[in-house]
Amino acid sequence: MIRAILFTTALALTTPAMAQQTMGADPAMSPAAPQTAQPAAPAQPQSATPTQPAPTASVASIVDSEFPAYDANSDGQLDQSEFSRWMVALKSQEMKATGQQLPADQVTSWASGAFSTADADKSSMISKPELITYLSAGA
């Protein structure tokens, strides 16, 4: 759910930029140009899903901007307490948004499990790439 909140936040931040690009490219919004008779081009097959910006890029920008606030010792990695502080803050936002409540021990247990999952190289530290991969997995 935290991944969904991060993705939703990233999407909300990028929506105005995407709207500007879309509006600038929309021929219906520009004055009509004289049409000349041209042979019809063969139809291009369209993909089944519309192209959207990669969620990883949005997650990466959020991680880049927020990482220093949680990297208390400024070593470029998060230890378990630094990571847990960030995840508990995200979980608190999620619970506030959904109106759900969990006991503090369950939130702490969840953050500990999240640390184990995010620490892909089992170094007992979470790097930015590990965090981006972990948060992008649910986006």
Image: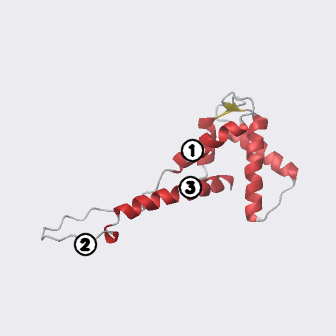
Q: Amino acid at mark 1?
A: Ser
Residue at 78% x, 65% y is 99
Q: Quadrant of residue 28?
A: bottom left
Identify the element where label 1 is drawn.
helix
Rounded to the nearest angstrom, the CA distance separating label 3 from label 2 is 32 Å
Q: Amino acid at mark 3?
A: Leu
Find residue 27 and name its label: none
Query: Which residue is tagged 1?
Result: 61
* Label whose residue precedes the other's in the sequence (2 or 1): 2
Rounded to the nearest angstrom, the CA distance separating label 1 from label 3 is 11 Å
Q: Is residue 54 left or right of residue 28?
A: right
Q: Is residue 26 visible?
A: yes
Q: Position of residue 54 (x, y in %)?
A: 49, 50
Residue at 64% x, 52% y is 3
Identify the element where label 2 is drawn.
loop
* Label whose residue precedes the other's in the sequence (1 or 3): 3
